[in-house]
Image (spheres, helix red, strand yellow):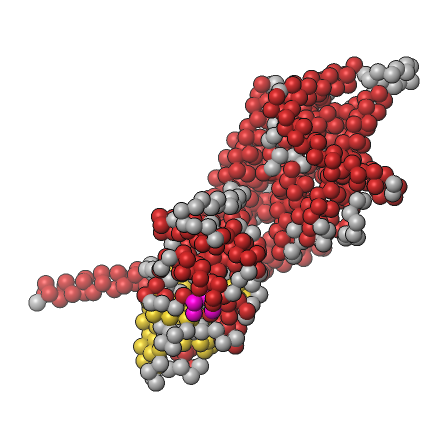
């Protein structure tokens, strides 16, 4: 008995300790994608700040001491008292946050404590590594002297708050406000500088997010009992509620009401915030905004969109699940619907009924977005319906509706054959020859949703058979598949990496330290280079507007020229811009032939203005106060001779000559009459010439500012000749955006005219960054907006 009594308490103690630890270490933790994205952003910001401290410690130190600090007097005495009081408040609120975590979400105290220790450790580690690169970097990041710096306590506090992840707690919110007040006091008292405050916050956020990603967080999904209570409160008491589909951030239940009717309940929580947005952005990069609609930021937004689609479809009489309600359950959202009874279309007939119901859905302004053999149901009364509208888009565009039709064709053709699917399309949906031609072009794997079984379609060659059936050709005939192109991320990355590698290689070969040169650059002139780049788009818009027979808004035309900067990334010079301008004029109501003529006239006038300008500036380069000569200066003659030699070599090649004649002759035949007509209208001619001069002036300004940023300069006529010569070679090069050719021509021209290579290389890098690389992301945004607005 003695042994038994001794063992029971020990076993009970171990069991109780195990239960206590288990209550703190919760199972079923998840890792939020948004936390991973935030961690990457915070880490990049922290690394950039540390790199700046190593490369330019003097500039950061000047920025750090820019904030005024109270050194003495009554104000400082009051600040000291306030700082002490705020520090105690922060400490008390942090303790209250920890107690709150233990009471309601015990697991939260573990990542909070780990993050609180990791924050200052990370700050010391990063600052010490930066100190190895530059002696002053560590002091700039942490503040001086270290024992008086508040950077480490701030990093620990921020990491603790981020690690606990108690967004709904009142103490957590108050602790953030109190910590912000403490940081302000430390800045005014000199315990923190602006740089060290940013560094402390970044290290705290990085450490807290790293712990959250590493250990996971407790999911925000409400338990089943809470869902039952919410449904009962809305008047839908359920006798059974079973999960049928579970995924992080979303779960779907099936239930049975007391009257025997079925329910389908979808619950979404904020754990997967940002995932739908990332998916939509990826589809936007692969396709077009007209095909994917407006991006949704959260699953909550998607569920709200699904409820709206169900309501609109139900009002229009489309056979879809009946919407019963949209309810809130703490941070989650609950969609309640009555499912549609039927069998999958793949198991029965009803091709014509499916097309007829799809037409009714489209007439209601909706696009399904995810059609497959399982989502289309055949109902007992012979009609067809849709099992769910989880990917539906209200206010659907024409392209979205056509993508639905293409997906339905593949679904029906997989079930029977291509001719039956096309016959159902013509009978149930109703099409025209023009609409069928557009559908033929969209019958591509890229345009199909994954649910339609693209691989199976490829194996059975359904897409080819459907194109043959739509075009009226026999199945044995040959129907060429239209080619769909999309911009791949690796294309942009490879182009950028190749250009950077070329710059680094040239810098090594010429013994030029590009990092030192960039560190000594004058930021004011770099800003002027950006201004010159912006001026070029105004000039390009003016040159286009001059010859358009209708009135075009100047702002929108400028935006189109900005959008062309993104297109230039993947097309040879002028090709993408010409195509985009023609498309813009077509959308504005200009006939296609007239639009092509307008753009051709602008390009021809650009050549007619640029060549005399090049010769004039070449002659002006030989004019001085002591001598007057009809020949350009020797340096400019060397540049012109090199350009002429390269162009002559290109013309001497048979393929190049044939290509040049094939393009120039049609261009002259189209543009000569319109050029004569433009010459008869002095106002349009002057506007066009002024636009071309403004365009070139912007580029010359950007080139001159880039040179002056690195303490170099050239006379204006010589600089104009160098730029125009490089632009001519770049336009003749077949590379995207003239990559390689423009850089080589600019560096060669600058060094030939007396600019040291140590200044020419970084100046060209800055010029191309301001006029080619930086406008590209802005151009992508402009192109997306113009597409969504239907302007291109």
Q: In which quarter of the image is residue 373?
A: bottom left
Residue in the image at 32% along x and 65% along y: 347
The answer to whether any part of residue 302 appears in the image is no
Is residue 403 inside the magenta stretch? no
**Is residue 394 something one can see in this rendering?**
yes
> Considering only vertical position in the picture, is 423 above or below 591?
below
| Image coordinates for residue 651, horizontal then vertical, percent | 66, 21
Q: Is residue 315 left or right of residue 379?
A: right
Q: Report x, y in % for residue 147.
A: 55, 43
In the rendered view, would you say 780 is above or below 740? below
Front residue of this view, candidates 522 and 483? 483
> Which residue of the protein is positioned furthest toward the bottom in this rendering?
259
Pick whichever, 447 or 251, lies toward us: 447
342 or 559, nearer to the observer: 342
Image quadrant where one finds the N terminus = bottom left
Residue lying furthest left in this view? 1
Q: Give the range drawn in magenta.
A: 352-356
Q: Nearer the viewer, residue 199 or 401?
A: 401
Q: In this view, does 290 lie above or below 517?
A: below
Q: Is residue 355 magenta?
A: yes
Q: Residue at horizontal 33%, vertical 82%? A: 260
Please tell me whether the stretch drawn in magenta is mainly helix, strand or loop: helix
Coordinates of residue 89 in the picture (x, y in percent):
55, 61
Q: In which quarter of the image is residue 109?
A: bottom left
User: In screen coordinates, is 241 left or right of 355?
Assistant: left
> Going 56% across and 34% down the picture, which residue do you hit?
496
Say which residue appears at 56% left-offset and 52% top-offset: 288
Q: How many numbered marks are there?
A: 0
């Amino acid at each position: 008995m003695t042994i038994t009594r001794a063992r029971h308490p020990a076993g009970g103690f171990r069991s109780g300790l195990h239960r206590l630890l288990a209550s703190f270490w919760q199972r079923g933790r998840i890792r939020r994608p948004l936390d991973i994205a935030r961690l990457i952003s915070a880490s990049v910001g922290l690394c950039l700040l540390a790199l700046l401290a190593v490369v330019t410690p003097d500039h950061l130190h000047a920025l750090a001491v820019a904030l005024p600090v109270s050194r003495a007097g009554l104000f400082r005495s009051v600040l000291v008292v306030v700082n002490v009081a705020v520090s105690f408040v922060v400490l008390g609120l942090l303790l209250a946050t920890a107690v709150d975590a233990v009471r309601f979400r015990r697991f939260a105290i573990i990542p909070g404590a780990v993050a609180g220790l990791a924050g200052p450790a990370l700050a010391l580690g990063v600052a010490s590594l930066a100190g190895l690169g530059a002696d002053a970097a560590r002091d700039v990041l942490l503040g001086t002297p270290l024992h008086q710096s508040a950077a480490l306590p701030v990093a620990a506090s921020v990491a603790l708050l981020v690690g606990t992840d108690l967004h709904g707690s009142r103490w957590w919110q108050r602790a953030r406000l109190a910590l912000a007040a403490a940081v302000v006091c430390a800045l005014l008292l000199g315990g923190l500088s602006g740089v060290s405050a940013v560094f402390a916050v970044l290290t705290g956020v990085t450490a807290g997010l790293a712990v959250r990603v590493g250990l996971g967080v407790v999911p925000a999904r409400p338990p089943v009992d809470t869902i039952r209570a919410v449904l009962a409160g809305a008047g839908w008491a359920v006798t059974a509620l079973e999960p049928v589909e579970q995924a992080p951030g979303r779960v779907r239940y099936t239930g049975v009401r007391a009257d025997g009717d079925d329910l389908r309940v979808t619950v979404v929580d904020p754990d997967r915030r940002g995932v739908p947005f990332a998916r939509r952005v990826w589809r936007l990069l692969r396709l077009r905004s007209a095909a994917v609609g407006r991006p949704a930021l959260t699953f909550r937004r998607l569920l709200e969109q699904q409820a709206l689609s169900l309501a609109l479809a139900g009002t229009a009489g489309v056979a879809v699940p009946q919407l019963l309600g949209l309810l809130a359950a703490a941070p989650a959202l609950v969609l309640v619907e009555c499912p549609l009874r039927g069998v999958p279309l793949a198991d029965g007939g009803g091709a014509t009924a499916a097309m007829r119901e799809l037409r009714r859905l489209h007439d209601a302004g909706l696009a399904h977005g995810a059609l497959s053999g399982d989502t289309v149901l055949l109902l007992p009364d012979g009609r067809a319906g849709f099992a769910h509208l989880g990917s539906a888009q209200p206010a659907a565009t024409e392209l979205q509706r056509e993508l639905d039709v293409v997906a339905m064709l593949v679904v029906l053709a997989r079930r029977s054959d291509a001719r039956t699917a096309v016959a159902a399309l013509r009978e149930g949906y109703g099409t025209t020859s023009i609409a069928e031609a557009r559908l033929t072009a969209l019958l591509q794997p890229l345009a199909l949703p994954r649910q339609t079984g693209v691989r199976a379609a490829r194996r059975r060659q359904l897409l080819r058979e459907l194109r043959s059936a739509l075009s009226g050709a026999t199945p044995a005939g040959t129907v060429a598949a239209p080619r769909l192109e999309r911009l791949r991320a690796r294309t942009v990355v490879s182009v950028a990496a190749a250009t950077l590698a070329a710059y680094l290689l040239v810098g090594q070969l010429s013994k030029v330290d590009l990092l030192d040169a960039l560190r000594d650059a004058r930021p004011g002139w770099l800003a002027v280079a950006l201004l010159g780049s912006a001026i070029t788009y105004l000039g390009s818009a003016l040159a286009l507007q001059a010859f358009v027979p209708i009135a075009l808004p100047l702002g929108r035309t400028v935006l189109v020229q900005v959008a062309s900067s993104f297109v230039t990334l993947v097309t040879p010079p002028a090709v993408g811009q010409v195509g985009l301008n023609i498309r813009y004029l077509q959308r504005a109501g200009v006939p296609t032939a007239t639009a092509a003529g307008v753009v051709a006239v602008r390009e021809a006038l650009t050549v007619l203005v640029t060549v005399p300008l090049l010769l004039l500036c070449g002659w002006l380069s030989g004019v001085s106060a002591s001598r007057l000569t009809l020949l350009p200066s020797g340096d400019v003659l060397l540049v012109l001779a090199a350009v002429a030699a390269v162009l002559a070599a290109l013309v001497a090649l048979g393929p190049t000559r044939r290509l040049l004649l094939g393009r120039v002759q049609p261009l002259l035949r189209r543009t000569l009459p319109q050029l004569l007509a433009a010459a008869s209208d002095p106002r349009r001619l002057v506007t066009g010439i002024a636009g071309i001069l403004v365009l070139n002036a912007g580029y010359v300004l950007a080139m001159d500012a880039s040179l002056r940023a690195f303490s170099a300069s050239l006379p204006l006529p010589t600089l104009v000749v160098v730029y125009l010569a490089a632009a001519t070679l770049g336009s003749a090069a077949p590379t995207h955006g003239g990559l390689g050719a423009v850089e080589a021509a600019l560096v060669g021209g600058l060094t030939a005219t007396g600019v040291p290579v140590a200044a020419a290389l970084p100046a060209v890098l800055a010029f191309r960054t301001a006029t080619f690389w930086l406008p590209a992301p802005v151009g992508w945004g402009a192109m997306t907006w113009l597409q969504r607005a239907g302007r291109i």
